Amino acid sequence: MEKNEIAGKLTIVFRTVFDNTTLVLTNELSAKDVDGWNSLTHMMLISEIEDVFAIKFKLKDLNKMKNVGDMIEIIRSKL
Amino acid sequence: MAFTSLNYLIFFPLLAVLYWITPTKFRWLLLLIASYFFYINCKPVYALLLAGITVCTYLFTGLIDATDVESKKKRYMVINIVLILLPLLFFKYFSKVNDGIIGLLELHHIRWPLPEIKLFLPVGISFYTFMAIGYTVDVYNEEIKAERNLGIVALFLSFFPLILSGPIERAKNMLPQFKTIGNLNYDMVVQGLKLMLWGYFMKLVVADRLGIYIDLVYTKFSTINGTNLLIASIFCPFQLYADLGGYSLIAIGTAKILGINVMQNFNRPFFAPSMAELWRRWHISLISWLTDYVYTPLSFAFRKYKLRGIALALLITFIISGIWHGAAITFMVWGLIQGIFLSIEALTGKIRTKFETRHHLKNNGLYTIFGICLTFVLFAASLIIGKAENIRDALFIYEKIFSTTSASLIGLSLLIVGITGLILLLIKDGADKYSHIKWLVFINKHKTIGFFAIGLCIAFILFAFSQIPGRTVNFNGAFYGFKNIVPGIKLLYTEDHSTFILSVLSISILLFKDVTDEYTPSKFLIFENKHKIVRVLAYSSTIILILLIGVLDGGQFIYFQF
């Protein structure tokens, strides 16, 4: 799957989890930029991403996700 | 050597001077020696334990880094965590659990072979054990390389500003700083001194003053009326905030003077409009530690259960946080209650957001104030359980608060004046925050309004003082510390009100600074004001207040027991 395609799918996931229809993803976007992205919603996001892309993360992967760019890279490596 | 002891006031300036004249290359070594000297001063034997934990962590992190085999890495991590947790578990929980078993078996007339052992908890062990665990996991997660220099690891775990009560720092922040200690930085020294000054104010003026009143009420809770219990319970969160928050500021300030940046531990917790927000502002270093090393792995493991999994992870994390504070059912229940509050918030999050957007409550001042008050009340109420000897006492206190009211130690007029004052404060802050162009009271474009407001304030303060029974505040008694000169509670309650009044005064000053920092960060910073006169006045009055109404009897910090 191409990066753009992943980003597109990811945008839908983000918009549902954070209940924000105008959210636009960039590589640098991180938790501090998004209203409501905290340690609670983060795990909802992770579990949602796993379902949508049919992948399984490892705990170690989570520590490496510092922003959306990292997230897309990690998802791509799993597909 | 506590920060509030005279020894520290000699030790630290001497060290700081020595530190800044030592060549940069050797400064870390000097810090290490000073840190061990500081810790040995508490109790020499415990330094051996600290050294043991250091060497153990050093060896195993080295092993984790040296191998590429995942299963081996994991095994080394687990072994190290178990090994360094053993002393903590033993010192903190062994005697309690053992006593419990003895008591239980005696009920059934069975003798338990292990004798009763009274252990003293090595001070700081809960803090440096957590730092060592965090470091080990970070090396395993490849967040940081294992440090080759044993001395630097030893300094990280023993660094004297943090060793007694945190902040629970991370290797990722501290190790690089210790390895690149630079030249004397004037700005950092000044900043450090400011933080220390406010820290001492919080501890000596606010926490210890409140402590006298709270301890008195809580030790005699069975004979004291509900009004006093209520007031003491409202004071409790302020006392804890001022105690650990004050300690943390002194620690952070001390480190800053030495050129080391340490994380923030409190961020004006009482402006949090929800429990989740409160726990992002309260004891930040502990909570973020628990988030990273307990909550995240747990919620990750439970993630397929979605929200319910998160709630379960929250419950377990906060029960652990409760037990971390002490081996008692009360702490466990206290932790559980925090977990329940947070779980409820998490489970109702979506509904609340919808409700807030529909009624445009996001930026509604009254709604925020309601949230802040509710959060505070819930938090204060839960602290009663943490503070009581056992659950039965806590329930008794709740019952008393609601059932027995009688004339408290303050007269009605004083209460009315106090509440009016608080309302005025809130009105001013509300006006400043939400209609800052139209309604600025003190810096209104019409000079007359400004002068009128200031005049009214002064008049109100004078009036408030005239309402204080006896009309004068007994500074003399306060200066020597009430603990020693008040023989019975009767005197404190009926004839001498100064402890209570000084408590309220100190909370007000603390809140005043926090309110201005929170809501008017550019306009009204007291310590960073652009007018030199304001800064000078702020510093000097803080120092005067510390000397005048600080409790200078070398009292201990509450968190030393944890």
Image (cartoon, rainbow, N blue to C red):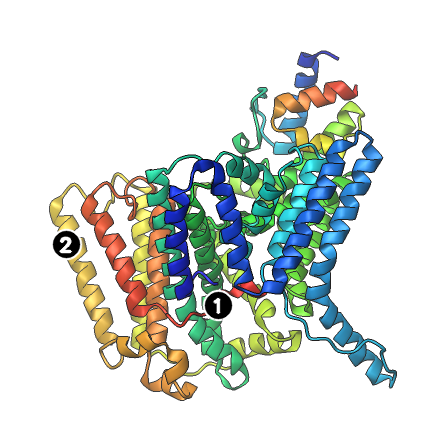
Whole-Å distance between the Cαs marked 1 and 2? Answer: 45 Å
Q: On the picture, is B396 further left or further right than A76?
A: left
Q: Which amino acid type is marked by label 1?
A: Gln
Which quadrant of the figure has residue A53?
top right
Q: Nearer the viewer, residue B294 or B58?
A: B58
Kind of residue at disc 2: Phe
Q: Residue furthest left?
A: B448
**Residue under circle 1?**
B556
- How dense is the environment of label 2, judged by Cα within 10 Å: few (below 14), some, or many (20 and up)? few
**Same-chain status of marks 1 and 2:** yes
Image coordinates of residue B513 in percent, x first then y, are 34, 53
Horizontal side of B34 relative to A11 (left or right) equals left
Quarter location, residue B92: bottom right
**Helix, strand or loop under label 2:** helix
At 72% from the left and 72% from the top, the residue drawn is B96
Residue B225 in the image: x percent, y percent?
Answer: 48, 82
What chain letter is assigned to the residue under label 2? B
